[in-house]
Image: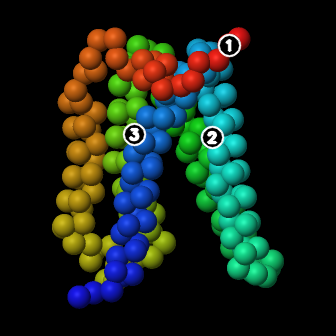
Amino acid sequence: MEDMNSYSWLLFALGTVLTWGLYGIFLHMGQVGMGDPVNGRYKAFLFVGVAYFLTAVLAPLLILIARGSDWSFPGKGLWLSLLAGILGAIGAFCVLLSLGALFAQGNKSAPAIVMSIIFAGAPIVNAIVSMVMHPPAGGFAGIRWQFVLGILMAALGGYLVVKFKPDPAPGGGAEKVASATLPKTSE
């Protein structure tokens, strides 16, 4: 029987699938829950930033302190990590803008559409950029047909999910969920 640690990467990957799968839904509900059709997306993004600060600044800081880490940050690692964070934040902002634009057009399925495109497209971008950075053995002529088929299936899958998604029930949607799950505040 294999050591369970050999599967820890899979558990973490599935944790990301779960949290990022819920991300678009809750982000859209937060945007709608702001009750501000003009600035709701920016208000929601502000709290995404607060959440990033809590989970991506304070939590690792406490872990580094608890582990007695040295405080050297080599330039290459620092700048590439900063760039990764900027790309992630820009991506989160683009998600909000996309959700808001689609919702403004009256499409109540904005999270399902936007996140399906993102989750089908991001692996394709990742695979292509990774291949350019680390070319396959034998050059690009050595790319197997199964890889190309996988790329095409990811693109087709994203398209099919968006094209044939079930329509939401009348009177449902993010507004109903947001108002049912959020605490009432006095204004």
Residue at image position (56%, 42%) is 92
Q: Is residue 23 left or right of residue 68?
A: left
Q: Amino acid at mark 1?
A: Ser
* Along the viewing direction, whichever of 168 and 163 lies nearer the viewer: 168
Which of label 2 and label 1 is nearer to you? Answer: 1
Residue 62 appears in the picture as rendered: yes
Disc 2 secondary structure class = helix
* Along the viewing direction, whichever of 151 and 138 lies nearer the viewer: 151
Q: Is residue 91 left or right of residue 65?
A: left
Q: Which residue is mark 2?
A: 48
Which of label 3 and label 1 is nearer to you? Answer: 1
Q: CA distance from mark 2 to mark 3?
A: 17 Å
Q: Position of residue 121 (x, y in %)?
A: 37, 48
Which numbered tag is attached to residue 67? none
Q: Dots 3 and 1: beta carbons under 8 Å?
A: no
Q: Amino acid at mark 2?
A: Val
